[in-house]
Image (spheres, helix red, strand yellow):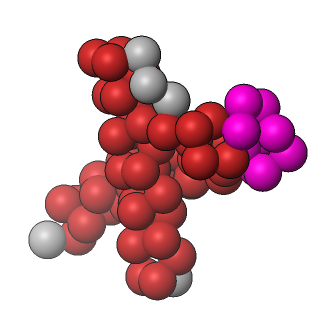
Amino acid sequence: MRGLDYTALAIVIIGAVNWGLIGFFRFDLVAFIFGNMSWISRIVYALVGICGLYLLTFFGRISDRSVNS
């Protein structure tokens, strides 16, 4: 489970960096590497979204740890 957590966190950080590049410089790194809305870039965007949703479970796990401590 811990490996999945770290993998999801790494993917979401990559997605956050990409959104920062879009916001500050209008540069979409995923589209630059894989093409604008190609099937690979859509998979990358979908993975970032799925990992972001998965990381929402961290809130529940963090509150469980604080109650058990």
Coordinates of residue 9 in the picture (x, y in percent): 40, 60
Q: Residue at x 57, y 38 (%)?
A: 32
- Is 47 or 69 nearer to us in this picture? 47
Residue 34: in magenta span: no
Q: Residue at x 29, y 57 (%)?
A: 62
> How many labels, in total?
0
44 to the left or right of 27:
right
Q: Residue at x 77, y 32 (%)?
A: 37
- When asked about the image quadrant of residue 10, the answer is bottom left
- When asked about the image quadrant of residue 58, the answer is bottom left
Coordinates of residue 54 in the picture (x, y in percent): 57, 53
**In the current view of this chain or complex, which residue is farthest to the left?**
69
Q: Residue at x 42, y 37 (%)?
A: 18
Residue 37: in magenta span: yes
Q: Is residue 28 above or below residue 35?
A: above
Q: Is residue 27 above or below residue 11?
A: above
- Is 10 or 21 nearer to us in this picture? 21
**In the current view of this chain or complex, which residue is farthest to the right?**
39
Q: Which residues are magenta?
A: 35-43
43 to the left or right of 58:
right
- Is 12 or 69 nearer to us in this picture? 12
* Residue 20 seen in render: yes
* Residue 56 seen in render: no
Q: Quadrant of the C terminus?
A: bottom left
Coordinates of residue 42 in the picture (x, y in percent): 76, 41
- Is 36 or 6 nearer to us in this picture? 36
